[in-house]
Amino acid sequence: LGGITMLFVPFGNLFHDPVHFLITLIFWIAFMVIGQYAFFRTLREIEASRLASLLGLKILILAAISLIFLGGRIGVLQTLAIFVSAASAMAMNWSGGGNISLKGCVWLFLTLLFYSLADLAETRMVLMVQTGSMIRDGIIIGGVSYFALGLCTGPVLFRCQRSWRLLR
């Protein structure tokens, strides 16, 4: 997907500060890779159906980072939405399935943390590109960042042991 999107990226004078953009992109790649690693470790501890709803807790991590480290301010309606989202994620996991181990909680927290940091880095990159359309800027950054992620992680796939057992 990133490669196809790259065909439509107007590179010209797109990035006003290429060094700052590249540094942010490198951080985004690192956050995504660590987040994905933590996600798959979490899957070993928490069932996929439960984990899917627990990923909704990422909004709490984003709000905490915004309030504590970025000096953000959250209004009453935003606070209510955050608590409703968190309550929904917890309520969907309360019905059966047993308890989540401490190890599972740690991996879940790391997953949410690094996905949140990746979101913040991606938002920063979107704000660096100013084509006049936030939607276009988001599509451009999505293409560029996932293309770069594929370039960095693609070669690793050739070194991984593959199993085609599930495809039979």
Image: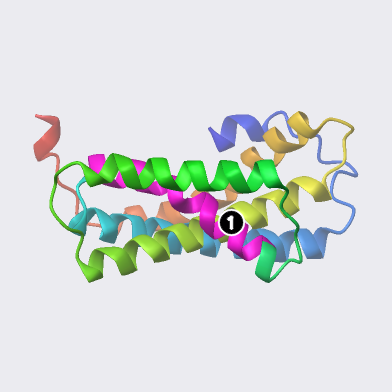
Local packing at callout 1 (Cα closer than 10 Å; few below 14, some 14-19, many 20+) is: some
Left or right: where 101 falls relative to 84: left
Which residue, given by chain and number where applicable, does mark 1 sit on?
62
Q: Which residues are magenta?
A: 48-66
Report the magenta stretch's main SS: helix
Residue 90's spot in the image, x, y percent? 34, 47
Residue drawn 21% across the image and 59% down it:
100
Say if 130 sits above or below 34 in the image: above
Residue drawn 49% across the image and 41% down it:
84
Residue drawn 58% across the image and 56% down it:
62
Of 10 and 97, the residue lying toward us: 97
Say if 50 sits above or below 16 in the image: above
Picture quadrant of residue 2: top right
Q: How many marks?
A: 1
Residue 118's spot in the image, x, y percent? 57, 56
Of 22 and 117, the residue lying toward us: 117
Say if 143 sits above or below 135 in the image: below
